[in-house]
Image (cartoon, grey):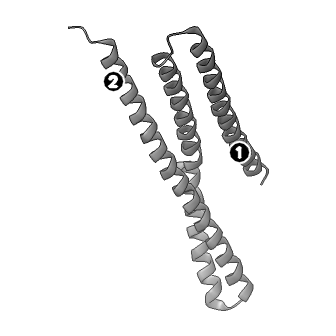
Amino acid sequence: MTIKASSRYDFLINSLTNLAQKAFMDEKKYKKRMDSLKIINIILSFSVTVLLGLKLGWFSNMALVLSAALTAFNTWEGYANYKELWIRKTELRIKLTQLMGDLMMHLTKPENHEDMEKYKEFYRRYEELTEYHSKDVIAIYQRENESHINS
C-alpha cells in the first residue's frame, strides 16, 4: 500500500502541530507551577521573618511550623525542577515551529525563479525572527540561572 505524498505531508504537519500545541500547554503548565512555588516561597519567608520579629511565645512556634513548610516547598521545588521542564518545553516548541516553517517552505515553493527569490527572502526573514526569539528566550534562561546560582 502506497501513501500519496500529500497525505504523508498532511500527517507530518498534523503531528508537528499537535506536538507544538502540547509543548505550548506543558510550557504554560510548568511556568505556572514554577511561579506558584516562588510565590509560596516568598509568602512563607516573609511570614517567618515577621513572626520571629514579633518575639512573642506562640509566634515563635508558628514561625517554626512555617519554616518547616518553607523547607518542604524548597525541597519540592528542587526535586520537581519545573523551571528546567519549562525551559525544555519552550525550546521544543521553538524547534517544532522552525521545523514546521522548513516543511511549509518545502511544500509551498513557487514555480518560477522570480517568485522563488522573493519567497526565499521572506523565508530568510522568518528564520531570522525565530532565531532572534530563541536566542532571546535562551538568554533570559541563562540570566535567571546565573542569578539563581549567585543567590
Place of residue 65 in the rendered image (x, y in percent of width and height, measured from the top left) = 57, 76
Place of residue 42 in the rendered image (x, y in percent of width and height, measured from the top left) = 65, 68
Q: In this image, 11 relative to 52: left or right?
A: left
Q: Given this view, does label 1 or label 2 mark the residue nearer the observer?
A: 2
Numbered badge on residue 75: none
Q: Amino acid at mark 2?
A: Phe
Question: Which residue is at a point 59% across and 41% down the rendered structure image?
Answer: 87
Question: Which residue is at a point 48% across and 23% down the rendered structure image?
Answer: 104
Question: Which residue is at a point 60% across and 12% down the rendered structure image?
Answer: 114
Q: Gap in Å between the C-alphas at discs 1 and 2?
A: 34 Å
Q: Quadrant of the N terminus?
A: top left
Mark 2 lies on a secondary structure that is helix
| Occupied quadrant, residue 47 | bottom right
Q: Is 148 or 105 nearer to us in this picture?
A: 105
Q: Earlier in the sequence, mark 1 or mark 2?
A: 2
Q: Amino acid at mark 1?
A: Ile
Place of residue 36 in the rendered image (x, y in percent of width and height, measured from the top left) = 55, 62
Q: Is 128 or 123 nearer to us in this picture?
A: 123
Look at mark 1 in the image and give the residue it sits on: 140
Q: Quadrant of the C terminus?
A: bottom right
Look at mark 2 in the image and give the residue it sits on: 11
Crowding around mark 2 (Cα neighbors within 10 Å: few <14, some 14 to 19, many 20+) is few
Question: Which residue is at a point 26% across and 12% down the rendered structure image?
Answer: 3
Q: Which residue is situated farthest in the bottom direction here?
A: 56
Residue 93 drawn above or below residue 67: above
Q: Is 138 or 103 nearer to us in this picture?
A: 103
| Occupied quadrant, residue 77 | bottom right
Crowding around mark 1 (Cα neighbors within 10 Å: few <14, some 14 to 19, many 20+) is few
Mark 1 lies on a secondary structure that is helix
